[in-house]
Image: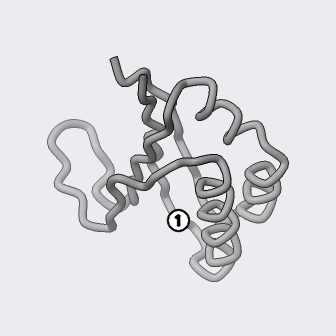
């Protein structure tokens, strides 16, 4: 059953964030994730910061999504992102 990682990203330092993005994309691909939506254009419907970026990544299962998040590759990406962005992230069961 698929699982969806949903992240809200508020970029604080665009230059530093640029180091994170390719590392995160490589980790997603390495763990079988597929970006199904991601945009800078957000139509806030309720209690949303329209300045934030959003991304939705599909994984084959909750365990696969968790494996991605806990991987050394993604933890390195998180370290590269330090002080560059505020990220709120959830992993949802696709049920």
Q: Residue furthest top?
A: 95
Residue at 68% from the left image edge and 56% from the top image edge: 27
Depth check, front residue: 15 or 95: 95
Residue 41 vertical position relative to residue 16 in the rendered view, above or below = above
Disc 1 crowd rating (10 Å Cα; few below 14, some 14-19, many 20+) is some
| 60 on left or right of 22 | left
Identify the residue at horizontal 33%, vertical 17% (top origin). Answer: 95
Q: Residue 23's quadrant in the figure?
A: bottom right
In percent of width and height, residue 91 lies at: 51, 29
Would residue 34 be found to the left or right of residue 69 on screen? Answer: left
Say whether residue 42 is left or right of residue 87: left
User: Which of the pair 29/54 is nearer the observer?
Assistant: 29
Identify which residue, 71 or 81, lies in the foreground: 71
Say which residue label 1 marks: 11
| Whole-percent x, y for residue 69 in the image | 68, 39
Residue nearer the viewer, 81 or 92: 92
- The x, y position of residue 76, in whole percent, is 82, 57
């Amino acid at each position: 059953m698929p699982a969806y990682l949903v992240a809200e990203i508020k970029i604080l330092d665009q230059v530093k964030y640029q180091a994170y993005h390719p590392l995160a994309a490589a980790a997603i691909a390495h763990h079988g994730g597929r970006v199904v939506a991601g945009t800078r254009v957000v139509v806030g419907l309720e209690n949303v910061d329209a300045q934030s970026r959003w991304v939705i990544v599909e994984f084959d299962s909750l365990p696969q999504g968790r494996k991605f998040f806990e991987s050394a590759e993604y933890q390195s990406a998180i370290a590269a992102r330090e002080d560059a962005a505020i990220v709120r992230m959830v992993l949802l069961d696709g049920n």
